[in-house]
């Protein structure tokens, strides 16, 4: 997309929440907006609302997997799960890594992200429109 990441907060607790909100920003930009853009032109408003609700439900399902609520297969001996990590990288090195199972909860964040609220710390730099 056309966004530039803001500089991460220095405070580690603030930065961890910022990273989770940044992951939510990516989910909204790269999944939600993409899916909505795929709704055919000319779709009536009632159907469009239902499709958007289905998209939101699918993203909530993804967030449940990221929180460890769902997304595991197992038998008496083996288990298989999908692991979700948020990585903050500086140049070519990983600066910080969050396993979403250990975070504040992607499902909790989703309700704010759907409203465009990604926390108090800016996720992306605002574009300068003064040219």
Image (cartoon, helix red, strand yellow):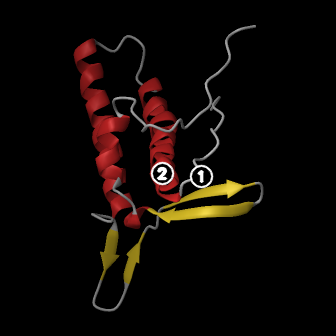
Which label sits on residue 125? none
Q: Residue lying farthest front?
A: 11
Question: Does 59 sit left or right of 87 as displayed?
Answer: left
Q: Secondary structure at mark 2?
A: helix
Labels 1 and 2 touching (C-beta < 8 A) = yes
Of residue 51 and residue 11, the one placed in the foreground of this image is: 11
Of residue 29 and residue 106, the one placed in the foreground of this image is: 106
Please identify the quarter of the rendering in which residue 24 is found: top left
Question: Does 37 sit left or right of 8 as displayed?
Answer: left
Check the picture and name the quadrant holding the C terminus: top right
Give the residue displayed 33% in from the left and 71% down from the top. 72
Tell me where residue 65 appears, x and y as whole percent.
35, 60
82 above or below 57? below
Tell me where residue 128 appears, x and y as whole percent.
68, 17
Residue receiving disc 2: 14
How packed is label 1: few (under 14 Cα within 10 Å), some, or many (20 or more)?
A: few
Give the residue displayed 77% in from the left and 54% down from the top. 91
Question: Does 58 sit left or right of 25 as displayed?
Answer: left
Q: Residue lying farthest bottom?
A: 77
Of residue 18 and residue 101, the one placed in the foreground of this image is: 18
Task: Determine the CA span between mark 1 and mark 2.
Answer: 8 Å
How packed is label 2: few (under 14 Cα within 10 Å), some, or many (20 or more)?
A: some
Tell me where residue 25 appears, x and y as whole percent.
48, 39
Q: Secondary structure at mark 1?
A: loop
Give the residue displayed 62% in from the left and 38% down from the top. 6
Check the picture and name the quadrant holding the N terminus: top right
Please identify the quarter of the rendering in which residue 69 is found: bottom left
Which label sits on residue 10? 1
Tell me where residue 34 appears, x and y as whole percent.
49, 32
58 above or below 95? above
Q: In this figure, what is the number of numbered marks? A: 2
């Amino acid at each position: 997309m056309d966004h530039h990441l803001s500089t991460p907060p220095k405070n580690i607790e603030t930065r961890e929440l910022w990273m989770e909100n940044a992951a939510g920003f990516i989910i909204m930009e790269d999944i939600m907006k993409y899916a909505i853009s795929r709704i055919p032109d000319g779709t009536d408003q009632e159907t469009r609302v239902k499709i958007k609700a289905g998209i939101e439900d699918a993203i909530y399902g993804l967030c449940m997997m990221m929180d460890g609520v769902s997304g595991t297969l197992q038998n008496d001996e083996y288990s298989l799960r999908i692991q979700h990590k948020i990585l903050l990288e500086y140049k070519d090195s990983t600066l910080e890594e969050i396993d979403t199972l250990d975070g504040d909860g992607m499902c909790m964040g989703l309700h704010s992200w759907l409203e465009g609220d990604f926390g108090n710390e800016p996720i992306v730099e605002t574009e300068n429109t003064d040219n």
